[in-house]
Amino acid sequence: GRSTEELVEAGNYAYAHSCVTSENFPARHFGARRVREIILLEFDHDVTSAEAMAEAAQLGLEPPMYEDALYFGIEYPDVQRERPVVFLHDPWFGFFGRRDVLCLWSNAGRRELGLEGFDDPWSRNYRFAFVSPQGRLGAQERFFSSRRAIWRRWTSSGPSAKRSVREWAHM
């Protein structure tokens, strides 16, 4: 499998945070090919990480791993140009004790991979990537009126993925 540095390079970012390295985010290899279905949640109001995670859990979604951000950025480079995508994985304790998570965004048309504070509030501009257990969702987008969370279905691919399969992510 590829190292974190190789995955970041494959993402072809104009900027990648200098702390996104194998030392801080070692790319884990799980032996056999894994299927990961990525769902993006968006809200019509500002939320905290806890609120986004609670909504995802209520919808039957699971938290992502940081590798999901790396593979998603490689496979779907234009998604982050629309609006930022946050991956609420187990936070990394960064400088000065801040808990950080990977985030994909665009700055002046340039794709970037960065770190954002897990404990900071998130504006309604952010979308949150979660993982659907296999076979739980249909192919259509789903809208929820209770909190107006919107599911958007995407995939990210790992080292042995076939790009022609769009419903699932392989790691």
Image (tube, rainbow, N blue to C red):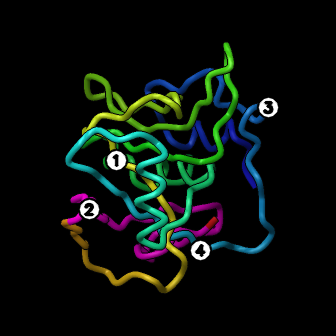
Secondary structure, magenta segment, majority class: loop
Mark 3 or mark 4, earlier in chain: 3
Contact? badges 1 and 4 (CB < 8 Å)? no
What percent of the width, then of the height, locates residue 78?
31, 47
Callout 2: SS: strand
Q: Decide: marks 4, 2 in contact (CB < 8 A)?
A: no
Q: In front of the other: label 3 or label 2?
A: 2
Residue assigned mark 1: 127
Q: Is residue 143 magenta?
A: no
Sequence-wise first label, 3 or 2 = 3
First in residue order: circle 4 vs circle 2: 4
Identify the residue under disc 2.
150
In depth, the one of 11 and 127 nearer the eye is: 127
Q: Nearer the viewer, mark 4 or mark 2?
A: 2
Magenta residues (range): 146-170
> Which numbered disc covers residue 23?
3
**Sooner in the amino-acid sequence: mark 2 or mark 1:** 1
Q: Is residue 149 magenta?
A: yes
Answer few, some or many: residues within 10 Å of disc 1's Cα (few below 14, many 20 plus, some between 14 and 19). Answer: many
Judged from the image, the secondary structure of the residue bearing numbered disc 1 is: strand
The secondary structure type at the circle numbered 4 is strand
> Whole-Å distance between the Cαs marked 3 and 2?
35 Å
Q: Which residue is mark 4?
A: 35
Q: Please state which of the two labelled residues, at mark 1 or mark 3, is closer to the viewer.
A: 1
Q: Badge 4: how crowded within 10 Å, few (<14), some, or many (20+)?
A: some
Closer to viewer: mark 1 or mark 4: 1
